Amino acid sequence: MTPAIQVQQVHKRFGAVQALCGIDLEVAPGEFFGLLGPNGAGKTTLINILAGLARADSGSVRVMGHDVIDDYRASRRALGVVPQELVFDPFFSVRETLRFQSGYFGLKHNGAWIDEVMHHLDLTGKADANMRSLSGGMKRRVLVAQALVHKPPVIVLDEPTAGVDVELRQGLWEFVRGLNRDGHTIVLTTHYLEEAEALCGRIAMMKQGRIVALDTTRNLVNRRDSLYLKLRIAGAALPAALAARVRDSRDAVHTLRLRSHAELEGVLAQVREAGVQIEELELLQPDLEDVFVQIMNREEGADGRGGRSAASALSAPAAPNR
Amino acid sequence: MSGFGTLLFKELLRFWKVAFQTIAAPVLTTLLYLLIFSHVMQGQARVYGAVPYAAFLVPGLVMMAVLQNAFANSSSSLIQSKISGNIIFLLLPPLSYWDFFAAYVLASVVRGMVVGVGVLLVSLGFVGLSFEHPLWILAFAVTGSAILGTLGLIAGIWAEKFDQVAAFQSFLIMPLTFLSGVFYSIHSLPDFWQTLSRFNPFFYMIDGFRYGFFGVSDINPVLSLGIAALSLLALTAITLALLKRGYKLRH
């Protein structure tokens, strides 16, 4: 089966910054795929190359089997992109914007589908309002609608929920899930890791222009090498033998790292022997965020070779913002 | 509608929606030039034999308005799209670089023509004119506005901020138009400036355009049209090459 997206050995440099260093990636038709990574990891550059907004220095990229350079007409017809920036044309209304976008794809008599897309995205009431007069959330919806006017089999959403209120975010995900159920391939980048965990079947994590993890969401979450035991204690101090396990201590609440459930018994025994009273106990399963932080930190240590300084300036905030 | 047709229509609608600024304002400005210059210069400037100065001036001003507005249309539309980022709506669809080029340049030609016709109609209320060879008038207006539309596209592609488009306009387009014989016949100039004027492609556009009205010109209109057409061809080749490469549009 032809992959929905096929990326082979893609390199891209912007001046002194190596934005992508040899990306290989395949997304199957119908997948809900997540692309995660800190700012400057190269996610948007990769999407731009996919969409023809940027050109790879080397390597090849195909959308539904169509090369994005040699067969750009077919590849662009197969792809709908919701850009990260909230862009709009202030000269036109919502309906005009969508009609033009549909016309650029050479579509005729597309009015019924445009009405349907507007209806699904709750834009019907604003159809004839000028783009300038819309709120940020409404503009975001128009961008989603614009990406869908030509019914593309592959849809890419580049941080679509950045700065979007909870209600719209829920509505948007409901809508995108529906598209995925109808057979559309979805590629999503987001900083909200719980969103990626809930939505994506498979995830690639990028850092400094490389893919550092690529697996199903379930395998990634299970990949943890630790879980956490959160204790509220009284009576005595935590025994010194457990100090190495402490990840976090605040007043009488301590979070201890365990390598597996098997260690739980031993830790609790040590606590009991020290005469410590347990008032509250909670076992924390690591989520995608923990795995993300783990992978990013591991890469930090592993990737200390030369030529990194330029790229690391771009990827400073490694912590995901919640 | 095809991708090209849609883009052309969108470009036309864009300037039509702000017609006060894009059509009425340049018509008024040009009219002021006409009133002031014809008043001050009447009897001072030596032009073609019996042609009164005001009548000589009108075709020059009409062509100047055509050229400047053709340039303004493509350059300002493109730089606005680039700065606001909505250029991506044109880069994501399967528009070819030919579609892109033709739509922007044609919209510029239409804008130039609409302003030109506006200036001409209003001028006729003040100055009597002859129309010796209407087809030459049309040929020079279309070629001239296409040249400037293409130059505007190049400026829009190259520029990264409004400032740079303004510089392109002020340091290239304005001097070339003002020194092209809009306000005088180059035969009234000292030899050195006459020779220099012949290196200005805008001079041939204005001179040939004027021939259409009076049947008189400094240069044979066939030669002028040939030079204008060659300029257009060369600029078109450059612009298409830039668009094909994605220069400053696709990174």
Image (cartoon, helix red, strand yellow):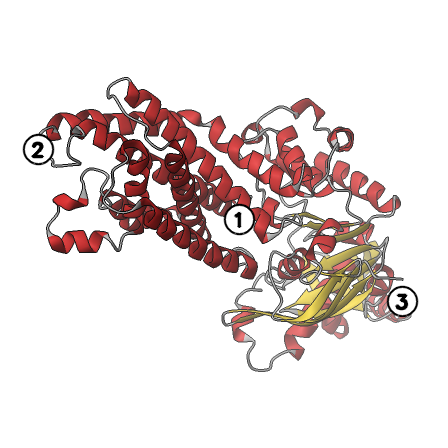
Asked if the residue at tag 3 contacts the one at tag 1, i.e. Cβ–Cβ closer than 8 Å, the answer is: no
Report the residue at 22% width, 32% height from top: B57
Cα distance in 3D space between marks 2 and 3: 102 Å
Looking at the image, is mark 1 or mark 2 earlier in the sequence? 2
Report the residue at 61% width, 56% height from top: A53
Indicate the chain on which mark 2 is placed.
Answer: B
* Residue nearest the viewer, comparing A220 with A140: A140
* Residue nearest the viewer, comparing A19 with A311: A19
Q: Are marks 1 and 2 on the same chain?
A: yes
User: Helix or strand or loop: what does disc 3 sit on?
Assistant: loop
Mark 1, residues whose alpha carbon is within 10 Å: few (<14), some, or many (≥20)? many
Of the two numbered discs 2 and 3 in the rendering, the one whose residue sits closer to the viewer: 2
Residue type pointed to by label 2: Gln
For residue A232, say whether it is visible: no
Asked if the residue at tag 3 contacts the one at tag 2, i.e. Cβ–Cβ closer than 8 Å, the answer is: no
Quadrant hosting residue A217: bottom right
Mark sitting on residue A242: none
Which residue is denoted by mark 3 in the rendering? A261
Instruction: Please say if B125 is above or below B48.
Output: above
Mark sitting on residue B101: 1
Residue type pointed to by label 1: Phe
Instruction: Please say if B77 is above or below A279.
Output: above
Which residue is denoted by mark 2 in the rendering? B44
Report the residue at 82% width, 43% height from top: A179
